Structures are given as C-alpha cells and as structure tokens.
Image: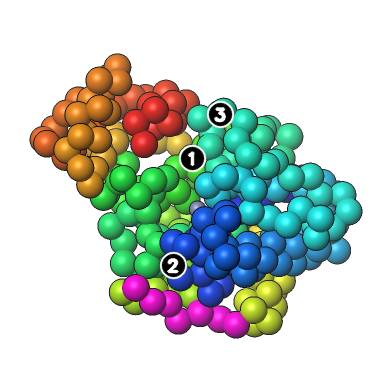
Amino acid sequence: MKIFISADIEGCAGVTSWKETILGEIEHFKAAEQMTLEVKVVCETLLENGVEEIVVKDAHDTGKNIFYDMLPKGVKIIREWLGSPYSMVQGLDKTFDAAIFIGYHSAASMTGNPLSHTMHTMVNKMILNDMICSEYLLHTYASACFGVPVIMISGDKMICDWAESFNKGIITAPMKEGFGEGVISLNRADALDLLKEKTIQAIGNMDGCHVELPDSFDVSISYNTHMSALRASYYPGVKRIDSYKVSYTTDNLEDMLITRMFII
Ligand SMILES: [Zn+2]
C-alpha cells in the first residue's frame, strides 16, 4: 500500500498565531516541531500497519517546515514547490492508494481557526459550487482526479466537521478549536495519541471515501482589496463581478486549479 500525506501547519495542535507559521521567526520552531511530530506519528502508524510506501508533501508556505531528519526510514518528503497547479498535493499520482491531510484548517471566512484562510490571506471568501471552498475541498478534488481518496484529515474542529459533512467516510482527528484570536487545543501527548488511533481507523476504512468529481466548477473569489480583484480579472476566463469579487467557470478540474494558481 502506498500513501500520500499532505501536511500544513495552521491546523496543528497548539498553533495559534501567524508568527508561529513563518520560517525564520523564533516562534516557528515549536510549531514546526509539532507539525513534524504529527506527521511522524502518522507515518510510523502506517508503516506498522502494512503500508509500504509513504510520500509526504510539506505543504505550508516555504515547504520547508518539517524536520525531515526525524521522519522514519522509508518515507520520502517533497520540500519547496514543484511548480504544479496540484499545489498541496503535488507529487500525487494514480499509483497511490489513499491520501491523508494533516494540520489542515478552516477556510477563509470560517470562524474555526484564528488562522483561517484559503491558499492566501488576500482571499476573504472563496466559493466553489455554492460551498465555502477550503484547501481541504480543493485538494480533495485534486486527489480525486487521480482516483485517490482522502481517508483522513486532522486540523481544527471546524474543518474536520466540514470534511465529515462533505465525505461521510472520512476519519477526522480534531486537534483544537478556534475562538476569536485564540484556540483551545489538545496538548502534544494527547494530540499524538489521537492521531495514532485515527490513523489505524482510517486504513481500515479506505473504501468509503471516494468522492465524485462535479461536472462543472463554478468559482467565485472575494478579495480583501479591490486591487487584487482588478489584477485577477485580467486572467483569461475570469470575470469581475464587483470591486472585490471575480468569478470563473470550467468543466475541467485541471483548468480550475491552473486558474486558481495564477489568481490567488
Ligand atoms: Zn499553511
């Protein structure tokens, strides 16, 4: 069995402020260590339960957060960015049996995490086919185009609950709840125990997580500034709706992801 792990940082246990997410800031160290340990425990549990191959994408910002020297033998890691519209799941292909998302977070406009966003903080709200569009939703579709199901998500409680409402089969591991600028979080030991328990459940439940791709993708993006909307409106196929908002429609998933890559 071959598993792809996409790891972000804003949904990891304890992580609360932007400074903790920025490589080079003193506060980043603890958050990166937490992200590393969360990925590590999931890798170890997978390897103990019959998984032969694991590829991890460090999918936060610089792509250089995970302490790769702490990952178990047999795990490959994708660092930095390979320039692909598949973004946080770049490197995924049809040879994988399943994907797991770790450290994921609420979408832009959702209140479940002080660090809620969708791809970039310039976005106030992104809607995809009448649903609030999170990084979870974008990359669940990106994975589905290779026939790969997302079998587990860890992160803040609100994105875990959202994922469960979208895909009844998914296993969720909520690490914390966001309120205003703060979080109520599990401690490290309990967070890692929960990830281990949920990973075992997830590999026993891989068949229930397949997602159908929609026939068309209707996207709208509201930005925090009118300048961002103006700039995006010059991309082919993108229409300006009002001073802050643009939209585009396509029936092709890859086109949807490519346009997204250039306007967020
Ligand atoms: Zn991130």
Q: How far from the left and from the top, in percent, is residue 183?
A: 43, 77
The residue under label 2 is 17
Q: Residue furthest right?
A: 73
Q: Which residue is drawn at the image coordinates 25% and 20% (left, top)?
A: 234
Q: Which residue is drawn at the image coordinates 54% and 34% (left, top)?
A: 86
**Mark 1 packing: few (<14 Cα in 10 Å), some, or many (20+)?**
many
Mark with earlier residue (2, 1)? 2
Type of colouring:
rainbow
Identify the disc placed on residue 141.
1
Would you say residue 41 sits in the magenta stretch?
Answer: no
Look at the numbered disc 1 and give the secondary structure of its residue. helix
**Residue type highlighted by circle 1:** Tyr
Identify the disc placed on residue 84.
3
Separation of marks 2 and 3 at Cα, in angstroms = 28 Å
In this image, 98 relative to 172: left or right?
A: right
Look at the numbered disc 2 and give the secondary structure of its residue. loop
Residue extent of the magenta highlight: 181-187
